[in-house]
Image (cartoon, grey):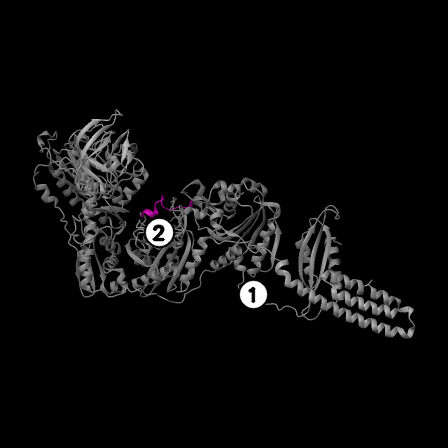
Amino acid sequence: MLTDTLEALRTDLERAIGTVESLDALAEVETKFLGRKGELTNILRQLGELPVEERKAFGQRSNEIKVEAEAWIAAARERLERAVRSAIGETERVDVTEPGTHPTEGHLHIMTQTIREITQIFERIGFYRTRYPEIDWDWYAFESLNMPSDHPARDNWETFFMDAGESKLGKMVLTPHTSNAQGHELERKQFPIRMLNIAKCYRRQSDTTHAPMFHQFEGLYVDRDVNLTHLTGIVKYFVESFFGKTRTFRLRPHHFRFTEPSFEVDVSCGICNATGLTADGQKCRVCKRGWLEIGGCGMTHPNVLKSCNVDPDIYTGLAFGWGIERIAMMKDGINLADIRTLYENDLRFLKQF
Amino acid sequence: MNSLVSYNWLKEYVDLKDVTPDDLAKQMSLCGPAVEKIIPRDVDFEKIVVGQITSIKPHPNADKLRLVTVDIGTRTIDLVCGGINLKEKQWVPVAQIGARVRWHGQGDLITMEAAEIRGVKSEGMICAADEIGLAEAFPHAEREILDLGIALPKMKLHAGTPLADVLELAGDVIMDIEVTSNRVDAFGMVGLAREASVILNKKLLWKEPSLEKILVTKSRGHEGTKSDPAHSPLTTHHSPSVTVHDNTLCPRYLAVRMTGVKNKPSPWWMKQRLLSAGIRPISALVDITNYVLLECAQPMHVFDETKMTKGSHGTEIHIRLAREGEKIKALDGKTYDLDDQSLVIADAERPVAVAGVMGGEDTGVDEATTDIVFEAATFDAVSVRRTARRLNLYSDSQLRFEKGLSTESVVPAMARAIELTRKLCGGTVVGPEADVRASEYKPLSFSIGIDEMNKLIGIPVKTTEIVSILKRLGFGVKKDAKKITAEVPWWRDKDIESGRDLVEEVARMVGYGALPPTLPFGLATRASDAIIAWEDKVRDLASASGYTELYGYSFVSKGMLEKAGFDASRALRIENPLTADLEYMRPSLLPSILDAIAKNSEREDGMHVFECANVYLHKDGTQGKEWKDLPNEFSECVVAIRSQETEEPWREAKGFVELLVDKLGVSDVRWARITSDSLWHPGRSIQAFVGDHLIATIGEIAPDVVETFGIKGRVGAAAIYLQQLVTMASPSKTYIPPSAFPASKRDLAIIVDRNTAYGNVMHAIRGIDALVQDIAWFDTYEGKGVPDGKKSLAIHLTFSSPEKTLTTEEVDAIMEKITLALKEKFEAEIR
């Protein structure tokens, strides 16, 4: 009798699995027939009612059925899962035009980004970066740079002086340019010098085009036989690397105390394509007749070399020192009505870079 | 400094036939002064013509308006006009439909349209001087219109002639030229013409006038009245008595007396030239001094001799320092207190001019002036600059003097002034000139080796070309086989300082475009300073972690320092700050960062910001003049978090430091709680050390401080002392192979006193057995189920051996050791 019950269970089970429609229903079927309190367990619990000689065969048979049933269930599960997966296009559909979840976004300041770009350009041609004091002696900031004591830049309405005593090297000043690095670097006497000094500078000026603190990058190249063609070579390389090959440059004679000859470098205007006129024939508002000033450069003045005990008959050099704020604005066409915006730390500005 | 230069005027000094302003601009910019802008002079006079009034009738509907018919050559037009000086036959400027005028001299230019004024049609307008930009040239009363017959008395006028033609502005342009400060000669038309003549290879037309010749030439009468020396109250025929009391500050003073001059408005040709350079015409005598300034770049002054207090030598001129308490009313109408460092020109009694800066009103010329003294002098550049700054008084003269002038430019300038005065105002020179100078002039002379020049230029330049360039620039040149010796022309006295300067003169004329660019490739001869790369690494980590970079000024105010609990007296002070907001060099980045957070806090909910920059600290405690060593400039990085969501933003700050320390390969960090720093929260702050070196302070900013800055919510921050930290950083990492055997994990929950530091618990566990591979905090709980004054700490432990799989029994044994140790050390109760 019990054997019949067992076979009936097998039949029922096969039917139930064959007709099951969902994974949940399948789990129910499994529990109902094969679970710890399921029907098969129930039958096996009645094993004691059988004669001893039948018990072994009955046990084997029930085990066969169990193995068989598990295979049916596995097959059914696979069938049902496949069906579920084939339907996810509908069942799991979401609106993927909704925005993604952003990673927490940080921002590097446009000055940092520009400084890195400049650094990379000059490192490629063998320049190394230095760091020298921002609060420095007058001697490095002025005297060694061939700027006489009555030079206007040394007046106290142009330059910041520290409330400090003097030394043999003069007063303590907030360096008004990165050129103070020249003396420090020349004193090391490690030739050839291929210095790139990027630093904060300070001048007593605050208006829409001047911030009292700003950044410059200073190049100094000193070796035997450095000449004007090297200066034009470096300027050309930098302009093309930084602004792109479509931009040209020109050198205009200028006057600085620590270089001779001295030049102002202009780069062609990217907005009006160096014509000075916009497409509708109006005067370009960004440039001066097609040109934008980058900054000064020149051949190191022999007096600068001499002041650092470098023999100008053996060594010659070239130097350039340009404002980073300015070239960053020029490159990206960022039109800041007030350059001091860079240092006002308004997150609405900073997060755009 | 920039000069405004009329192209037509420049053409008087250099042959510019076949040269357009554009050509000139292009070539000049490459070799000398840069032409930055070119502005046509006649654009604003388009559709404005000369008209003659033929009839004037009353306006039917308005008392103050008239109906005027004007002949404009091709036809007559009817218009409505309110001018109070209208007359028949009057010559007037007529703005036709389409002309642009400045309505009542104010606002922007407006294009004329046909209009109906009080019911009467008007086809244009008769202009007042200020409506067409001529107010300075032809001043007249309010509500009047410009009477061209009066304004241009010598001119034959025709109805219909474009006004620009009458004014001789048609076709002219103004060039805005940047002249470098060393080229004071090129601030004058003559100097600029000389540059142009060399650059464009054109003939210089200027002939330097000779004072000697001019002084012997008798006056040939003048425009207007005849000279009449008999009217002069001056009877002496001596030159003025000039005494230079300080010949360092005044190396040369040249004075010439004239009598019988007649002062009046200048003729139009002179007015328009002054206007082209931005100088307002005043009267012929004043205009002559300004004209010479523009022409020769030598400032001049003219005194009314009768207004000068005479001394025992008659007219006395003293060039001396002002005396304490002396004042002067300058030509700008303001009175200035003088100090004993200011050089003045004084008569027998009082200052009559601030030397090189501005003349005094009391001795200025006016319409009644007949006797004058012209001054052409050389003053010390620095003294003029500093005096102008101290008095806050600036002028076209001072701008030139402060660049440094040659003592030799006074002579041609004086000659020109006399020449022009005779032409415009008549008069005769009285007595010989008074010329006081510190020393005889000797031209400077410099040499440079031909080899040296070519080596520096980088391409060989022919010696004949070198010589030719220098000669055309006015140098006296001698050469031998090896070197070139050049005598400097006087107008380059303060500019050419060595043989090296000759290189520039040659190179710029050869043209920089001719130099082949050569890139000096090479390997860096030394490494970049290490701190720079470390700072970049920190910046990258911070921005990758979601922080936005700030850049603040290096200077802060006393108030800002004090708000953040810093003692301003210990910070580095600037002697001459621009404003009190920018007085101290910041000893920490935190005050400015808190300020930035405050400024943004209205707009932003959560903020993650950082800055990486130098801070400035005394090497020792000295201040003020006692402080004689360059200070320390230390690299610092501050990250700060303002969040209104989390109650404990310090955790993020500390997490950043932990991550950074790990990335920099710094190990053995020791932590110590801080409780007594007014900037930091007394219960939520900690410092990190390596050995004895402080590397960071981390925590929550004290709520008091946060409130003082006006920030809502809590602020967590970490100040990381990079200068110190990076000395311990190691760029290389050591690889530890992962164990091939699976690790076992257990959780541990203990109840300890609430002041027991997790850090100490962690250290205790770490020391127990090498098989404890990882200890990770995951929760601290106080409250229900935990006795008062206690807390529950929950920790994940990971056990692992590089040699085998640990058995349950082995892990149990270690756990047993751990619980025993924690019970003993912290009276911990295992949950």
- Indicate the chain on which mark 2 is placed: A
Q: Amino acid at mark 2?
A: Phe
Which of the pair B236/B276 is nearer the observer?
A: B276
Which is the main secondary structure of the residues drawn in magenta? loop
Q: Is residue B162 left or right of residue A42?
A: left
Q: Position of residue B138 (x, y in %)?
A: 21, 35
Separation of residues labelled 2 and 1 (CA atoms): 45 Å
Viewer-nearest of discs 2 and 1: 1
Q: Residues within 10 Å of mark 1 (few under 14, many from 20)?
A: few
Q: Which residues are magenta?
A: A151-165
Q: Position of residue B604 (x, y in %)?
A: 53, 45
- Please tell me whether residue B713 is drawn above or below residue A55 in the rendered image: above
Report the residue at 32% width, 48% height from top.
Answer: A149
Report the residue at 18% width, 47% height from top.
Answer: B8
- Indicate the chain on which mark 1 is placed: B
Which of the pair B157/B321 is nearer the observer?
A: B157
Q: Position of residue B82 (x, y in %)?
A: 24, 29
* Residue at numbered disc 2: A142
Element under label 1? loop
Element under label 2? loop
Which of the pair A105/B651 is nearer the observer?
A: A105
Which of the pair B318/B507 is nearer the observer?
A: B507
Q: Amino acid at mark 1?
A: Lys
Q: Is residue B721 left or right of residue B625?
A: right
Report the residue at 76% width, 69% height from top.
Answer: A70
State if disc 1 and disc 2 touch (CB < 8 Å). no
Q: Is residue B632 among the parts visible in the rendering?
A: yes
- Please tell me whether residue B18 is drawn above or below residue B145 in the rendered image: below
Residue B733 circle label: 1
Residue A144 circle label: none
In the rendered image, residue A156 lying in the magenta stretch gets the answer yes
